[in-house]
Amino acid sequence: DIQVTQSPSSLSASAGDRVTITCRTSQSISDFLNWYLQKPGKAPQLLIYATSSLQDGVPSRFSGSGSGTHFTLTISGLQPEDFATYYCQQTFTTPPTFGQGTMVEIK
Amino acid sequence: QVHLQESGPGLVTPSQTLSLTCAVSGGSIKTGGFYWGWIRQHPGKGLEWIGYIYYNGESFYNPSLKSRVNISPDTSKSQFSLRLSSMTAADTAVYFCARARVGHSSPFDYWGQGTLVTVSP
């Protein structure tokens, strides 16, 4: 299985901050990388697919970039509703695997 | 708007088989373009892909669970089911059903709310 490692595992930030989360994979996955947000007690929500494509209805403050084994999710101007746990997922090979998550907390 | 809803027992005895159903509305599992699958999340942990099915009957499973898992469609009722045999405490988790788009990166774009399954005597 392809291993997916996110960093940091958690971070504290203030509303309005620019936040970057990194996802690294154990082998090259081209751009087969998705990002999700999960709030406590809720299902994950798709934010970005294929590394940089914004899912319909997702605010433009979310953006993704990268290729190969190194990917980033950036939130430009953190909003109160963005405090949550973020997961990346590779779908280059089966089984698709997820990172361990990055919890974004209020400073 | 596609809506998915899981149903099934919240408590399973060790060694039993778990059966969960996912009811789909606002979309059809009988047409191409989407996979219909299951993902689980152990308490306080990350996400684990269990498997999914395609409308033509093709199924894809996580090798770590393949010997114990079966996902099947019920097109007459627009739902699909998960069966996971030989349950142990390690299978205690929240189980989500979800839809994945076929194609580039196959993201899960719609999810059910999830159902907690506890394995205990």
Image (tube, rainbow, N blue to C red):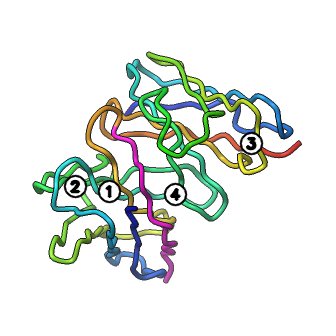
- Residue B38 image position (x, y, % from top left): 36, 58
Q: Name the residue under label 4.
A: B41
Closer-to-camera residue (A19/B120)? A19
What is the distance, in whole Å, between disc 3 and disc 1 at their CAs? Answer: 28 Å
- Residue B86 image position (x, y, % from top left): 33, 70
Find out whether residue B109 is within the magenta segment: yes
Q: Residue B53 carries which label?
A: 2
Is disc 4 on the same chain as disc 2? yes
What is the distance, in whole Å, between disc 2 and disc 3 at their CAs? Answer: 33 Å
- The amino acid type found where label 1 is placed reads Gly
| Displayed quadrant of residue A60 | top right
Q: Is residue A47 above or below residue A72?
A: below
Q: Mark 3 points at which residue?
A: A104
Which residue occupies 15% across, 76% down?
B76
Indicate the secondary structure of the residue bearing disc 3: strand
Q: Give the range drawn in magenta.
A: B106-121
